[in-house]
Amino acid sequence: MRLSRYFLPVLKETPGEAQIVSHQLMLRAGMIRQTAAGIYAFLPLGLRVLSKIEQIVREEMDRAGALEVLMPTIQSAELWRQSGRYEAYGPEMLRLKDRHDREMLFSPTAEELFTVIFQNGAKSYRDLPRNLYQIQWKFRDETRPRFGLMRGREFLMKDGYSFDMDMAGAQHSYNRMFIAYMRTFARMGLDAIPMRADTGPIGGDLSHEFIVLAPTGESDVFYDEAWLERRDSSDVDASDADALAAYIETLNKDYAATDEKRDLDAEAACGARLQRSKGIEVGQVFFFGDKYTRAMGVSVQGADGTPVHPLMGSYGIGVSRLMGAIIEASHDNGGIIWPDAVAPFSVGLINLRADDPECAAACEGIYAELTAMGVEVLYDDRDERGGAKFATAELIGLPWQLVVGPKGIKAGVVELRRRAGGAREELSVETALARLTP
Ligand code: ATP
Ligand code: MG
């Protein structure tokens, strides 16, 4: 992509409306614009990041055996009356009427709809277990939308729902999602700690929130600092129910809880290792048994012929909130530092002298070659000073900057800079290209 033809409305000043760094940087880097309180437009650079986050979530859900569907955002009130949540949900639910005066709503979550849709394809125990998910916009009329994408009113969520015949199956489904979440957040460069949590309006018995530690987070959290040493969980065999359960048990052996689930005895046992912090909730998993299948009259035939209400779990990830959480975790004074996996482009190609024919020709060649190799390049071909180009490159935070200047080109070299850490190297064009291609 050539910057001269791109739509990148960067801002020099920090907008006064933004209180936290991720919101400030997303506005300054031309990624999003607010169109009404808590409602955002995604501009090209922002959409590229959102799509990458979404794709990682999708790949890990698919890997865990979940099946992607797409439900409508607008649902009928009738469906929600069956579960008793239409009145109970309160003013956070955006209620609408169609031209025939029928009551509708913009989905804030989708347990009811998934439950009745599931019934369409499941008649007997042979049709279970199943896990269905979607990546879809949600609307919650939050009292205080704020902090940009962190607490929006319209936001992108991955929501998934599992259906099992018995407790052992349901626990395994929960565990599979648990481990898929660990992997998902790790791939985005985030340390997300699973914490025992309250179930809130979803209801149910068992729940964990996945929390990224950050001073700007809205949740109060308490944990054993042993958690900070935990990393990769990619080697456990998730299809082996016992191995997975054992793994999750050891994972959860160290204390970590949100303030609603604080356990003072467990905290005393942590001693000096106890930490208190603020955190951002990037995902939550719930088990709630037959709460919805019973309420909605959904059942399947069991092995002995008697009808059974399947046991359900639901699993949410804040896809758009993650964009903010990643920036909160990875930035410096110059701007964003994208982890490779979610970067909008991997290389910023900077032409220091757009008016120098030799320099321009070298850049064109590099740009063509990287593009042909499948590397995502944003080529700063604008007629601007070097200083302005560097400032933009730092702000938008692409992992690599490839700097091409007239002196270097005469000597056959370019400069390769790593955004994270700032290491710089002078390399021949050939070596630089080899570094950047997979
Ligand atoms: P919170 O406690 O932050 O209000 P929640 O517990 O009500 O969130 P869930 O129902 O668990 O939210 O939704 C699943 C995920 O969707 C959350 O873990 C969070 O990452 C994301 N999410 C929830 N509300 C918002 C919002 N207003 N803006 C952006 N993301 C949100
Ligand atoms: Mg939650």
Image: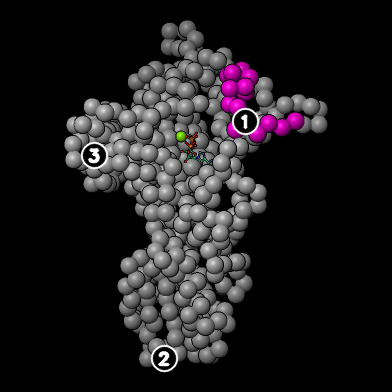
Q: Residue at x 45, y 90 (%)?
A: 406
Q: How many C-alpha atoms fall within 10 Å of the one at disc 3: few (<14), some, or many (≥20)? A: some
Residue at the farthest front position: 16
| Amino acid beneath label 1 | Pro
* Highlighted magenta segment, given as a residue range: 80-97
- Of the image marks 3 and 2, the number of the one nearer the N terminus: 3
Q: Residue at x 47, y 67 (%)?
A: 395
Q: CA distance from mark 2 to mark 1?
A: 63 Å
Q: Is residue 91 toward the left or the right of residue 324 in the image?
A: right
Of 346 and 11, nearer the camera is: 11
Q: CA distance from mark 3 to mark 2?
A: 56 Å
**Magenta stretch encompasses residue 9:** no
Prevailing SS of the magenta stretch? helix
Q: Residue at x 48, y 65 (%)?
A: 396
Of 55 and 222, nearer the camera is: 222
Q: How many C-alpha atoms fall within 10 Å of the one at disc 2: few (<14), some, or many (≥20)? A: few
Q: Which residue is mark 1?
A: 91
Circle 1: element type? helix
Inspect this view and state whether residue 36 appears.
Answer: yes
- Of the image marks 1 and 3, the number of the one nearer the N terminus: 1
Q: Which residue is mark 3?
A: 274
- Quarter of image, res 253: top left
